[in-house]
């Protein structure tokens, strides 16, 4: 069989030279190191595993750059949320699909090969239900099919407008469901993604402010052993309101009342204290960090160095999709730690450690866990013992533009340091997802058509 041949590849065991990868279609059949290319092989210099994007609200891509005008008072997450709600009120199914397809295409062009879509837009514009409760989830699945990205669909349970079962606001009407309706939605989501070869459906209680304890207990079994994601402790106000409601901080309350384990992804966890960090690390849950969005919204800085020092697991996501860039998320994560501690190479993992390599390895492993679950819960796709490029794993890989000035003269971990801190998304050359080459020369094969469709959708929304 023809294969792919690389001068240098990052494998789970480390950097390897003269590597030939042969697939059986969507998955890697075998990897041979120290071998010359064979006739017909496609040849490249540098290859890396594609990164998982563990937290996205794809529709928010259309808002990027439109919320940077200051309001009459100090802007923060809560004022941004009101602008987002106004936008949500206009979205129809066609617009949602077009925007999502663009976001997923840009993710592939930026080095992400699987996305966790935290999907909470369920109903029609007036809050009425569609004949198919998973109508909009089906649009997400269609966008994933069009772009080719791997999809972990996370239907969101959202019932309230604040802690203690506060009634939702009219602007939240498109999100709201109850446990019975949510069960139907999850079932519909599984049907919606069934045409996709390796899609996964988890569940996502939106946040403790949107779910009562009784509802949380009712919906968790719907995960059926799969992944569970939740927004938690993103803002100071959220922590204060949770204390007022329960006498506990959000993460503290969750750890006391739910069996948080390796299936869970705690998204943001920005305002975690030392005891919470230790407990989350001990439970093996992943913290889902979205550094570009967290910076854009002014959320705060997650105590990353303290968490990683305790063996904590992290991944990165693009969240509001203000800027889609896998390397950019990792760069912002490190830079936020530098600003907070007034030091350099904070997350490097010890003396002489490469910051880029440490960040990449952590995001690869944590993202794979958060989007595919542990091997026993991975569904029809058997996972290798470690995330990355290995026999039996999906053929999800990226190549870097080795002639770019940022990579000239670089090798090994310097490649990662230079991509993350000196090159970003413009260094992405080719991307394979599920064995299919979707990106060449940094451009998705359907880029023009997807952008044209997005432009028509945005024109309707802004009319």
Image (spheres, rainbow, N blue to C red):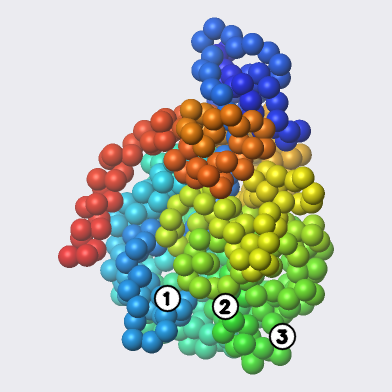
Please tell me how crowded label 2 is: few (under 14), some (14-19), or many (20+) other residues with Cα within 10 Å: many
- Tell me the quarter of the picture where residue 145 sits: top left
Spatial CA distance of label 2 from label 1 is: 12 Å
Spatial CA distance of label 3 from label 2 is: 15 Å
Secondary structure, mark 1, is: helix
- Tell me the quarter of the picture where residue 127 sits: bottom left
Pinpoint residue 269: horizontal percent, then vertical percent.
64, 70
Residue closest to the eye, 155 or 39: 39
Visible residue check, residue 22? no
- Residue denoted by label 2: 235
Q: Is the Cβ of the residue at disc 2 closer than 8 Å to that at disc 1?
A: no
Q: Residue at x 57, y 84 (%)?
A: 237
- Residue denoted by label 3: 248
- Tell me the quarter of the picture where residue 305 sits: bottom right
- Residue denoted by label 1: 81
Sequence-first disc among 2 and 1: 1
> Which tag is nearer the camera, tag 3 or tag 2?
2
Residue closest to the eye, 343 or 366: 343
Q: Is the Cβ of the residue at disc 3 closer than 8 Å to that at disc 2?
A: no
Pinpoint residue 104: horizontal percent, then vertical percent.
43, 48
Residue closest to the eye, 118 or 71: 71
Sequence-first disc among 3 and 2: 2
- Number of on-image labels: 3
Secondary structure, mark 3, is: loop
Q: Residue at x 58, y 29 (%)?
A: 409
* Horizontal relation, residue 247 to residue 110: left or right: right
Sequence-first disc among 1 and 3: 1
Task: Tell me the quarter of the image containing the C terminus.
Answer: bottom left
């Amino acid at each position: 069989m023809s294969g792919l041949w690389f001068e240098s590849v990052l494998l789970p065991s480390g950097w390897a030279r003269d590597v030939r990868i042969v697939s059986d279609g969507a998955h890697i059949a075998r990897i041979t190191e120290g071998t010359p290319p064979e006739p017909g092989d496609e040849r490249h210099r540098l290859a890396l595993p594609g990164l998982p994007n563990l937290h996205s609200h794809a529709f928010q891509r259309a808002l990027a750059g439109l919320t940077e005008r200051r309001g009459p008072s100090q802007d923060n997450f809560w004022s941004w949320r009101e602008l987002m709600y106004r936008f949500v009120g206009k979205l129809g199914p066609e617009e949602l699909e077009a925007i999502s397809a663009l976001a997923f295409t840009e993710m592939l062009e930026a080095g992400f090969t699987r996305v966790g879509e935290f999907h909470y837009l369920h109903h029609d514009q007036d809050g009425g239900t569609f004949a198919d409760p998973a109508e909009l989830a089906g649009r997400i699945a269609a966008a994933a099919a069009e772009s080719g990205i791997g999809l972990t669909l996370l239907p969101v349970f959202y019932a309230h407008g604040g802690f203690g079962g506060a009634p939702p606001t009219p602007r939240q009407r498109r999100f709201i469901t109850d446990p019975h309706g949510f069960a139907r939605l999850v079932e519909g989501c599984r049907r919606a993604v069934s045409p996709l070869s390796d899609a996964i459906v988890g569940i996502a209680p939106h946040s403790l402010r949107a779910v009562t304890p009784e509802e949380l207990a009712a919906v968790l079994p719907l995960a059926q052993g799969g992944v569970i994601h939740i927004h938690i402790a993103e803002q100071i106000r959220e922590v204060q309101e949770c204390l007022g409601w329960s006498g506990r901080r959000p993460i503290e309350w969750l750890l006391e009342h739910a069996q948080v384990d390796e299936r869970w992804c705690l998204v943001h966890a920005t305002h975690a204290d030392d005891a919470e960090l230790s407990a989350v690390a001990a439970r093996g849950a992943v913290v889902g960090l979205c550094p570009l969005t967290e910076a854009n919204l002014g959320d705060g800085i997650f105590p990353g160095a303290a968490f990683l020092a305790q063996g904590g697991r992290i991944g990165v996501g693009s969240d509001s999709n203000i800027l889609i860039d896998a390397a950019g998320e990792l760069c912002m994560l490190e830079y936020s730690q530098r600003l907070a501690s007034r030091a350099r190479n904070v997350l490097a993992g010890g003396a002489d450690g490469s910051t880029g390599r440490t960040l990449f390895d952590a995001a690869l492993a944590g993202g794979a866990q958060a989007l595919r679950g542990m091997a026993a819960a991975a569904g029809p796709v058997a996972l290798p013992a470690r995330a990355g490029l290995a026999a039996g794993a999906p053929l999800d890989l990226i190549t870097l533009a080795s002639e770019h000035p940022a990579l000239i003269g670089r090798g090994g971990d310097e490649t990662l340091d230079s991509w993350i801190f000196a090159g970003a998304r413009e260094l992405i050359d080719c991307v394979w997802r599920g064995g299919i080459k979707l990106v060449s020369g940094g451009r998705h094969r359907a880029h023009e058509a997807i952008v044209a469709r997005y432009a028509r959708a945005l024109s309707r929304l802004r009319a």
